[in-house]
């Protein structure tokens, strides 16, 4: 196994580079045989990257950016030239040794996140530690800490398909970080993300770079992303054409703060963060304010008065259904407008049904109480006379109860229909 390989530079391997140099490429070329053609993906590239730098590699498609990243990440070896990482010449090493360097020194972040599906965020982040043979308890502790450092402490048991793109990339960053590597390599880490989410990921990378001194090399084709780096290397046809230090890189967190606020509705859906219980509550609507019932009663009196005046002055006679219609319209109009004023939005379907039923029950109970009082007050004779047509029901109590309930139901339904009809739309 590769355990025998030491990660300290040996004296025999030439002059040790100065301490703060992390990456050193000397005359690196990479050639691919493509059929009869030879593709020269990197041509004689020499450069150094110091610890703590934040380097963006830019260039058109096919200019050799990914090839460079594969070499920096020890995923591939140069055709010619040498690559030294943290003082360790990696080019000539056997594959196992390069795997070890990769595992110890480098965290990878990819455009497509490359998380294991159907595997929780926590397990995804634990994976590199598992490869290193670290015990379950320590693994869990470090994975949790890494997820917390990318602000995902509350999503550790989510699987990738339950997370938004930005959150998945943050899980991938936590996975890259969990082994505490001095170097993070990211090939188009924001290529699949929208502007806001890209800036969030970038702000996170800048923080890791600043606070923990992690060296970051990232490939991007977006100018805004490159502006956030402390150094921009431009490639063309396998060569470095410009290499510019940016003294005042853009602060992604500040850029983020300056963005217009997200459209909550869209963002909530994109993030799939709506709690189904919360959504159901919203659909049903909360308690109906008592003043809605009060205004319903006031509305019924106003509707009654208007209808009575219409009967008296316009028609010259009293038509019962017009009186009834006036009451019903008055109730519904005033109650629904009061509801919207108090709740800030129209009554929900559920709230309308509740208002209709409880108002009907309330009015019936109130009427019953008034009638009972009148009876006690000695107006019994009047009551009996009024109830005479119903007297045959007294011998059939179940039928009486049935009729009573049916009338209540019909009145509730009528009120619900009028509330729906007259309720403001928004
Ligand atoms: P970039 O990432 O900047 O778009 P790449 O580094 O992927 O560019 O590719 C540089 C050049 O090398 C391209 O012309 C590409 O077609 C070629 N290339 C990359 N990988 C291979 C490969 N495995 N085999 C053959 N050609 C390759
Ligand atoms: Mg590429």
Image (tube, grey):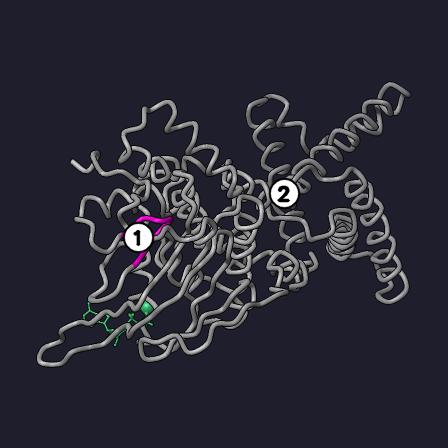
Q: Residue at x 74, y 33 (%)?
A: 362
Q: Nearer the viewer, residue 157 or 356?
A: 157
**Range shown magenta:** 83-89
Q: Residue at x 31, y 55 (%)?
A: 73
Q: Residue at x 84, y 65 (%)?
A: 315
* Total numbered labels: 2
Camera-nearest label, 1 or 2: 1
Residue 265, image x, y percentages: 58, 57
Residue 140, image x, y percentages: 39, 28
SS label for mark 2: loop
Q: In the picture provided, is 288 more to the left or to the right than 178?
A: right
Q: In the picture provided, is 21 more to the left or to the right than 128?
A: right
* In the image, residue 88 lies in the stretch drawn in magenta: yes
Q: Residue at x 40, y 63 (%)?
A: 188
* In the image, residue 215 lies in the stretch drawn in magenta: no
In the rendered image, the residue lying farthest to the left is 36
Quadrant in the rendering for residue 319: bottom right
Q: CA distance from mark 1 to mark 2?
A: 74 Å
Asked whether residue 116 is in view, the answer is: no
Q: Earlier in the sequence, mark 1 or mark 2?
A: 1
Mark 1 crowd level (few <14, some 14–19, many ≥20, 10 Å Cα): few
Q: Which residue is mark 2?
A: 285
In the image, the residue with mark 2 has its CB under 8 Å from the nearest atom of ligand 2? no
Q: Are marks 1 and 2 in contact (CB under 8 Å)?
A: no
Q: In the picture provided, is 124 more to the left or to the right than 403?
A: left
Q: In the picture provided, is 8 more to the left or to the right than 303?
A: left
Q: Which residue is mark 1?
A: 14
Quadrant in the rendering for residue 119: top left
């Amino acid at each position: 196994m590769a355990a025998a390989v030491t990660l300290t530079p040996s004296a025999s391997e030439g002059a040790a580079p100065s301490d703060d140099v992390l990456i050193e490429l000397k005359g690196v070329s990479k050639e691919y045989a493509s059929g009869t053609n030879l593709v020269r993906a990197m041509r004689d590239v020499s450069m150094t990257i110091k610890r703590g730098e934040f380097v963006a590699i830019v260039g058109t498609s096919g200019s050799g950016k990914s090839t460079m990243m594969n070499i920096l990440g020890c995923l591939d070896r140069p055709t010619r030239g040498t690559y030294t990482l943290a003082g360790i010449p990696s080019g000539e090493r056997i594959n196992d040794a390069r795997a070890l360097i990769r595992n110890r020194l480098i965290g990878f972040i990819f455009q497509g996140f490359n998380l294991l599906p159907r595997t929780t965020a926590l397990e995804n982040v634990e994976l590199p530690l598992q490869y290193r043979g670290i015990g379950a308890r320590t693994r869990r502790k470090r994975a949790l800490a890494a997820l917390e450092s990318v602000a995902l402490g509350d999503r550790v048991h989510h699987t990738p398909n339950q997370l938004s793109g930005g959150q998945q990339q943050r899980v991938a960053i936590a996975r890259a970080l969990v082994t505490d590597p001095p170097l993070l390599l990211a090939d188009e880490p924001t290529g699949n993300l929208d502007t806001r989410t890209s800036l969030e990921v970038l702000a996170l990378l800048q923080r890791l770079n600043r606070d923990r001194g992690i060296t970051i090399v990232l490939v991007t084709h977006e100018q805004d992303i490159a502006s956030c780096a402390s150094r921009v290397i431009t490639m063309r046809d396998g060569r470095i054409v410009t290499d510019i230090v940016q003294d005042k890189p853009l602060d992604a967190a500040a850029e983020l703060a300056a963005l217009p606020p997200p459209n909550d509705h869209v963002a909530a859906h994109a993030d799939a963060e709506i709690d189904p219980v919360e959504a159901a509550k919203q659909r049903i609507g909360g308690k109906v304010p008592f003043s809605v019932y009060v205004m319903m009663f006031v509305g019924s009196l106003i509707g009654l008065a208007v209808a009575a005046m219409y009967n008296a002055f316009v028609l010259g006679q009293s038509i019962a259904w017009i009186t009834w219609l006036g009451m019903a319209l008055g109730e519904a109009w005033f109650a629904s407008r009061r509801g919207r004023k108090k709740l800030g939005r129209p009554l929900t379907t559920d709230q309308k049904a509740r208002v209709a039923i409880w108002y009907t029950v309330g009015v019936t109970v109130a009427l019953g109480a008034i009638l009972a009082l009148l009876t006690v007050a000695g107006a019994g004779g009047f009551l009996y006379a009024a109830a005479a047509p119903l007297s045959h029901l007294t011998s059939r109590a179940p039928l009486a109860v049935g009729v009573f309930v049916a009338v209540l139901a019909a009145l509730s339904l009528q009120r619900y229909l009028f509330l729906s009809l007259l309720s403001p739309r928004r």
